[in-house]
Structure formats: C-alpha cells, structure tokens
Image (cartoon, coloured by chain):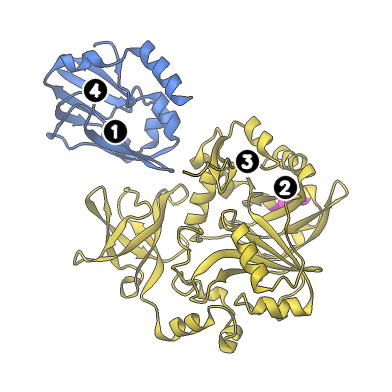
Amino acid sequence: MGKRVNMEIKKTSLYQLHHNNSAKFVEFAGYQMPIQYSDGIVEEHKFTRGHAGIFDVSHMGQLLIYGSNDLVEDLEKIFPLDLKNLKMNHSKYSFLMNDEAGIYDDLIITKTEKGFMIILNAACKYNDFKIISKLLNDKYKMELDNKRSLIALQGPKSVEILNNIINGVNDLNFMSGNWFKFEDKKVYVTRSGYTGEDGFEVSIINELAEKFTKELIDRGAKLIGLGARDTLRLEAGLCLYGHELDRDKTPVEANLKWAISKERISQGNFIGSRIITKQLSDGVNKIRVGIKPEGRVIAREKTKIFNQLDIYIGEITSGTFGPSVNGPVAMGYVENKFSKKDTKVFLEVRGKKHPANICGLPFYKKSYVKGVN
Amino acid sequence: MSEVKFSKEHEWITLEGDVATIGITKHATEMLGDIVFAELPEKGSNVEKDGTAGVVESTKAANDVYTPVSGEVVDTNQTIVEDPSKINEDPEGSAWFFKLKIKDASELNSLMNKEEYDKFAKESAS
C-alpha cells in the first residue's frame, strides 16, 4: 500500500473575508471555497440578478504566455480562433482540444501587450499548462499567475459600483479589457462573466484583494457562493466543464460552433480540426440541448432521458432549480434527431418518468451591454 | 397532543389519538439550505418505519424523507408541494409533511425527546 499523499487544501486571499461573512465552505478543485453565505443560494442568486454579486474566482487559472507574432501563429495551431485579427485587450471564448476534438478545458483568451492571458478552469489548470507548454515546445515564457486574485462582479449594478472604485471601467465593451489602477497598483479589468449578467472580472494582486472586495461590499455588492454561481450559469445556458464539457464531447456536439472561427475552419490547421470539419458537414449523433421539466421535479446530472416511445435518447449533464425562472431547469445531451425545440421527452427521476420539453437556451435572458463580440 | 419526538434522520413526530403528524426538523432545513422541491407519499398508501416516505430537494441535492413510524397515510400537506420554501419558513409548525394512522404506538418509544435530539443534532453537525 502506498503512502497517502497529504494534499494541503489551498485557500484564496479572500478566505478570511468569506469566513467572517459566515460562508459555508466546500472543497473545490483543491481549494477551500464558499458554497454559500448566510442568505442562501436562492437569495444570493436573486441578488446577483437584481443588484451586484461578488464572486471569488481566484481558484481559476490565470495563464500568461509571453510572445508576439510567432506566438500568435503557434496559438492558432492550438485554438480554433482568428487570433491574428483579435484586437488588443479583446477576449474570446474557446477550448483546448485533443486530436479527436475532445475538450480538455474551456477558457477565455485575451490579447495583451505582452502576449496572451488565458483564464482556465481551476480543476484543469495544471494539466492545461502541461498540454499547452508541450504544444508550444517550451518556446515561450509561460506562468500560472498565483500572485493575483480574480474577483468577478456580476449583475445590473456592477458597472455603477465598480466605476466608483475604478474610474473608466464603464467604457469597456463586453469581452474586452484594460489596465486600470486601484490604490496605485495595476489591476486588469475585463467586462465579462459567467452568470448571464453584465459584469466584470478583476485581476488584482493578492495583497489588495480583500481591501478591494470590502470596497465593493461597502458600495452595496454582496458576496455570492459557488452554489448560486451554478444556478446562475445554468439559467444562462452556459456550460460547466466536467458536466456539459469533457474529453468525450466536442465543441460541435456541445452546440458551441459559434465559438469556432469560420475562417479557421476553412483553413483547417488546428488541433481537432479534422473531426470538427467532419462533424460540421456530416452532423453529429448527440448534441447539447436545454431541457425544461413540465412539473416541479428536478432532474439532476446523470438522469436518463427517453423519447415518447420510451427509448433511451440521452442524459442530463446539469439540472437544478432556477430561482429566476422559478422552476426546474436542465441541460443534457440527446440524440440529434430529438434535439428540436419543443420535442417532448421523459426524464427518469426516482423510477418515475416525468414529462419535459427540449427548449432553447438561455432559460433566463441575458442582459449583456454593448455586445461587441 | 403528545410530546414532540425526533428521529436520527431529522424528522419530528407528534401523536394525537392514533394519528401521527410528521415533518422535518429546523436543524434539517438549516443543513439542506433553500428547499425548492417536495414530494410526499400518496394518500391511502402504507409506509413502514424507517422506510422512505418522500423527498426534499434543495438547490444543491435531493434527500429522502423517512418515516419514523409505520402506518397508513391519511393526509398530506399540499401547500409545501406548491410552495416548498414554506418548509424553510416554518418546518416544525405549518410545514408538516404527512399524517399517518399508526398501528403501533410503541414504535415511538425508541425516538428522542427534544433535549436528546438537540444534543444529537449538535454532535452530528460538527
């Protein structure tokens, strides 16, 4: 028997602040993270939709890759993006894939003065780092920045609150960013997020993370846990890695072909392009859809989906109660021929089949501003 | 009405004649968080002591509700099915789950009183 490796659970720079705000903690990707605070998931969710919620996402990877023209070319061999035409400080949603177009991670890549910044999922970041540095043949300086925290502010009041603290962020367009100052230190702010609301993500040195967050709280924003982050992103129809996305699913199957550059598909010289091109022309067997149960029953992950003839056609990948929708919501994969909107399906929950309908996404309408994509 | 008794599965029970009223404890609702779904046994069905007799779901997860005694379901509280958030508001009062016509009152003997349950809940939470 091997010795048990004693992995220390990591804490973010906001740990003490979470604790002081009576957070309930959960271990997530090796980090002690707040799942909720005293208000509870439903109130936190609604507060974000109506006001402004603060999310500590410092566990996510902030990968910096330094380089110029060569780097752009090399990254285009990895990501299905038109990086040559990506403007300075603009961001794109993309994926790290294998040769079969299976997804290692989904990510946001931003062009910066020194190269690129890539925001990675916490559970994938170390593996992504290895894969990317190998694909780049260690040609470029790369670092997973652990000196900076990442704090998201989401909701309709975000712009007003943040602009009071960091003047000028109100001029940012959706999916773009820039350097600003907080307490004379540089912070990188992007207008982005993962809740279906207008909002920002602020990359700030660890020493100032708590002070900055307290200023957000002083101006009326509230700390929101991972629990509400999940209900918010699900209502917004956004994928969560390990659920909607994994190595056995491709971006085409995940219904994310909008995120793949048409230009790059015609060139076809990126990892996974062979499968993606084939799937785009021949179609796919399974595809991600939104699913709305007719009653109140919640169909959780791994719930089996059946058609009207009681034949198995797929599985739920995320399912919960949507506080803004005020009812159950789910996403899952079904056989392509049953993926049309309003197709009636049945979800097997605790041995009983419950009626549901395939529906369009999002469940909750986004209110992103100035949609420069 | 009899003294309130408690089970290790965090249900409470009161007895009036041979009809028991059963719900989940305040401690249980605090552990669960916001309750967003409740499923109750069918009226007229029979449930067995320690068997499942319903489901409550929070935004996070689904949890079975057990019955601390055996009996026939004579009434169910549809107001908590229609608005599950009522369970968080008044778990040990108006948000009862179901009523049973019990067979054997001695089944209540093994259950905890308030003081014992509070101690049990405190220990199981830590």
Dividing the picture into quadrants, the one containing residue B9 is top left
Q: Chain of mark 2?
A: A
Label 4 environment density (alpha carbons within 10 Å; few <14, some 14–19, many ≥20): many
Tell me the shade of chain B: blue
Q: Position of residue A76 (x, y in %)?
A: 66, 79
Label disc, if present, on residue B20 of the rendered structure: none
Mark 4 vs mark 2: tell me if same chain: no
Amino acid under disc 2: Ile
Mark 2 vs mark 3: tell me if same chain: yes
Amino acid under disc 4: Thr
Label disc, if present, on residue B65 of the rendered structure: 1
Amino acid under disc 3: Leu
Residue range in magenta is A159-163
Identified at 64% across, 73% down, the residue is A135
Residue with the mark numbered 4 = B21
Determine whether the residue tagged by mark 1 lies in a helix, strand or loop: strand
For the residue pair B1 and A2, the one nearer the viewer reads as A2
Q: Let me know if residue A90 appears in the view.
A: yes
Q: Earlier in the sequence, mark 4 or mark 1?
A: 4
Q: Position of residue A301 (x, y in %)?
A: 38, 54
Point out the image quarter for the C terminus of chain A.
bottom right
For the residue pair A246 and A136, the one nearer the viewer reads as A136
Residue with the mark numbered 2 = A161
Tell me the shade of chain A: yellow
